[in-house]
Image: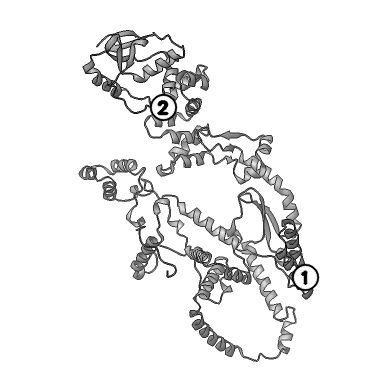
Amino acid sequence: MTDITMIALSKLVPGQRNVRKTKPAMSVDELAASIAAHGLLQNLIVSEADKGRYSVEAGGRRLKALRKLAKAKTIPGNEPIPCRVVPLDDATEVSLAENVQREPMHPADEIGAFAQLAEAGHGPEAIAGRFGVNGTHVARRLRLARVSPRLIEALKKDEVDLDQLGALAFTDDHALQEKAFFDAPEWQRTPEQLKARVTQAHVAETDKLARFVGVDAYVEAGGAVASDLFADEDETRFLADRELLVRLAEAKLEPIVTEVQAEGWAFVEISIDGVAWSQFPERVRERRRDLTTDETAEQERLYAKLDETEDEAEIEKIEAAIDALAPAQWDDDEVALAGAIVTLNHSGDIKVERGLVRVEDVKALRALRRKRTTSAHGVVDADDAHAELAAAPKPAVPAKLLDELLAHKTLGLRVAIIDSPALALRLVAFSLAASFMGDASASCLTISVDHVDVERSITRAESRAASEFTEIGSVWRSRLPVNPEELWAYISSMDEPMLLELIAVTIASGIDLRRVGPLSGMEARQALGQTLCNLAGLDMTKYWKASVESYFEHVRKDAVVAALMEVNPKLERAALEKAPKKEVLTRAKRTFKQSAWLPSPLRTTTEATPLAVAAE
């Protein structure tokens, strides 16, 4: 091997045979800082040039860094530089060999090295200065050095990447870090999912709970705040003590609870996370009495005045006067059966949901409404009802004849409604909505959808679609009135797109693609289900991912081999078929880690033509 020769920096010039042409990861400034702190750790490769100079064929960046240091007077302009002189004809080959043989440091080794320097008393900025790197880069590496040793070992084996490790480093709890990563299936190990697991006990400062309490009030009460060092753009802080936040929020809501309790409700409760609508199948509403003749005239006068003004303050004043003519009121007997929930909306503002009826009080509410309806039609509710009924004249139309007449009317309506498909559509929507809200008897159309619990069949992987479907249902239940008259008025005023969405929501829970029901219709039902999936453009990769746990360990080995060959046709099928299933599963675990492959039962033809709702 050629000896090292010391050559003055002023005699070194850039060569033309360096094989490295692309821009390297480390900048010249960073390299100059490293050389200034630690000296030149690797000699240059040079060839003799004219006029006593030497061309640098390997180490061009080091030459630039050295010249930068000389210009800054950090080193002399004629500083002796260790060089290896090679013949000009060998320069390209030597340059290639130097670059090919060089191997970048593994992140795990860099993390360990920075940690040792920190333990020796060097701060992040000092370390950054010595190596010419960004201070944030060093701080992040030092943070990663504090994660579980088991995860560091996984990093060395490339079983976890830096983004995943950064998400887990949000907490210093090694047990929580390990549980979040190793106990989760591979498809649930994205940085976002891992961060969600380790921050479950934390609350983002943008969360409605934090907004309502206020970060300053939380800190004043002794709460800790944490920041995510690895968030490049999102600098959201996290409040570490959710229990404290909840206590502070409940204390702040107590005066509101006291005010609402004074309204006479059967119960008033605080629910920070919203209303569990399934616990309240019925709801009572405020009612407005009919206006008197004088009040109607005053209302018309106020409306005319409202049309004439554009002043916001005046408009608000007039609208308040209109509302005051016949203020909405709650029926005392319904209030005694219902309650209220004090909660927070998405923005962190107080929201009071009144008129909620628990499951056990629904029967009493319906009996109350039947009693009120009966009284309105002139039937006596007292103990002497039988005496009055006996004295009452017989109805002009006998019950049997009445039913016959109504049968004629029914048939007439059936024919008439065919000529009014828009009305038929709203009748279907009303009937489904009434059933959806728990009162299918409110409609003259016998149609309802039974909720089918398909989640009980899911045991191998969590359903991502379940929570999305539940949230959609909760939103619609909060919109729809419970009273049949109000519900019909609400649906009658809907535009058609919203009406169609309501029908979709109300029928969705009755859909079932499983192999259930009479065997005679199984094939037709399966075919229709596939057609609907195609027309809806269903993409199951949004809701399910193939893994050993969710699929492969539960099917025959030949099915796993077929899936592997489908994803990677270059694999040797014969070798896979001879290998033990355990070995094939290990291969599948690696192959399908980032794959969107789906088994046949979950596939759809997403390019199918969407179903037209109306003719163009």
Quadrant holding the N terminus: top left
**Rendered location of residue 289, percent (x, y):** 73, 71
Task: Using the image, tell me which numbered label, if any, was put on residue 211.
Answer: none
Depth check, front residue: 410 or 396: 410
- Which residue lies most toward the front here? 51
Between marks 2 and 1, how big is the CA–CA gap? 80 Å
Residue 56 visible somewhere in the drawing? yes
Q: What amino acid is at disc 2? A: Ala
Residue under the image location 45 percent in, 18 percent down:
33
Residue under the image location 63 percent in, 72 percent down:
485
- Mark 2 vs mark 1: which is more N-terminal? 2
Residue picked out by circle 2? 108
Kind of element beneath mark 1 = helix
Residue picked out by circle 1? 298
Give the foreground label among 2 and 1: 1
Q: Residues within 10 Å of mark 1 (few under 14, many from 20)?
A: some
Query: Which color scheme does this rendered protein use?
Result: one colour
- In the picture shown, does residue 510 fall above or below 62? below
Number of numbered discs overlaid on the protein picture: 2
330 horizontally vs 449: left or right = right
- In the picture shown, does residue 561 fall above or below 392? above
Depth check, front residue: 240 or 315: 315
Residue under the image location 34 percent in, 28 percent down:
22
**Rendered location of residue 122, percent (x, y):** 51, 18
Residue 515 visible somewhere in the drawing? no
